[in-house]
Amino acid sequence: MAHIGVATRLVNERQCGQETANADLECSSSRYYVLIREAESYAKKHRIARTYGTNRYESLLKDSEVDAVYIALPNGLHHSWALRALNHGKHVLVEKPMANTAEECRELISLAESKGLVLLEAIHYTCCLHPSRFHPALQRFKEIVAGGELGAIKRVKAGFAVPSVISGLFFLKDDVRFDFSLGGGVMMDMGEATAVGHPADSPNIDKSMNAHLVLPSSVSGDLYVDFSMPGWGPFGMIPRALKTAVVVELEEGTVELTNFPLPHIFNTITIRPKIGKKRTESVYRFKDGRGEEWWTT
Ligand SMILES: NC(=O)C1=CN([C@@H]2O[C@H](COP(=O)(O)OP(=O)(O)OC[C@H]3O[C@@H](n4cnc5c(N)ncnc54)[C@H](OP(=O)(O)O)[C@@H]3O)[C@@H](O)[C@H]2O)C=CC1
Ligand SMILES: O=C1OC[C@@H](O)[C@H](O)[C@H]1O
């Protein structure tokens, strides 16, 4: 497994290292001279066997010892590097969103299929399709919702929003998320999981999004994502709490999962039936014992 881009800041590098620790070979590739040092110290820390220097993404892809690549580049570069990696016969784990447009995603999917390669988007919190993969808390959440104890689903509400008072700690002024040419914007970033002046006021970048989804079924959906959620009260001076929860409203009650983006740090699943007692669970491992506390994706 080779990393393209060391993605040191918001992708949890400790986990990237641990999750690929059992791979036969790990290689890391970095663009700029100054970042080569970062890539090398990252490699040393995580016992990565080989690093490629300046402009070496291409040579990494030509390395016949590399079977699979993890693409942790800014959004706008996912499609082109995933395409190249697949064309070099590599399996691809690509950060979310897989690409900038649905058309680009279709192109990657059909190429992977035609070559018999794995193409997987690194998004643990929406991948509930496979019964045994991804984070156990998400699987348990799905099991409760689909299990029928609270009847049919009526509405789903998801929020992922960082309060303005701490936004600058999460997102630096020159963050790739504020660069339109790199596929920036909150919908592409946090909206994929689920507007007010930020220090980085970049052109063409959406910083907050409220979406109401009307689905073919009778279920409706509401999403709220925000890089810099304003406070409330006089002059918006009272900060709001970080939002990272999804609530499913069913006929007979609600089920809420808190901290879906980072469920390994903590998670709670709260079941509130209309009749009867509320109960709460936290899930870090699969029922069969698999899983580690640090497991994210
Ligand atoms: N699944 C998850 O939970 C999360 C996923 N992400 C996703 O990971 C991806 C990377 O995000 P994040 O780690 O925060 O980004 P960073 O800016 O921290 O890292 C991006 C990496 O891309 C490389 N890069 C290559 N070309 C460019 C360029 N033109 N401009 C800037 N960087 C470049 C850089 O490595 P170098 O220069 O060394 O090649 C850099 O290390 C995004 O797609 C994001 O959506 C982020 C956080 C969590
Ligand atoms: O988990 C996350 O938290 C912050 C976001 O900017 C990031 O891309 C996302 O995946």
Image: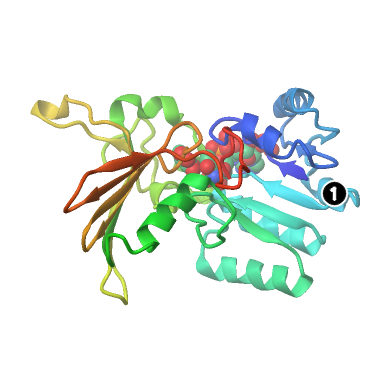
SS at mark 1?
loop
Task: State the residue in front, 128 or 99.
Answer: 128
Tell me where residue 269 sits by quadrant.
top left
Instruction: Specify the quadrant that holds the N terminus.
Output: top right
Task: State the residue in front, 24 or 279.
Answer: 279
Task: State the residue in front, 199 or 284.
Answer: 284
Residue sitting farthest toward the left = 234
Please give left or right for residue 230 compared with residue 39 in the image: left
Dot 1: within a 10 Å radius of its alpha carbon, few (fewer than 14), some, or many (20 or more) residues? some
**Point 59% across, 55% down: residue:** 132
Q: Amino acid under label 1?
A: Val
On the image, numbered disc 1 is attached to which residue? 66
Tell me where residue 282 sits by quadrant.
top left
Q: Is residue 179 visible?
A: no
**Point 82% across, 61% down: residue:** 89
Residue sitting farthest toward the bottom = 216
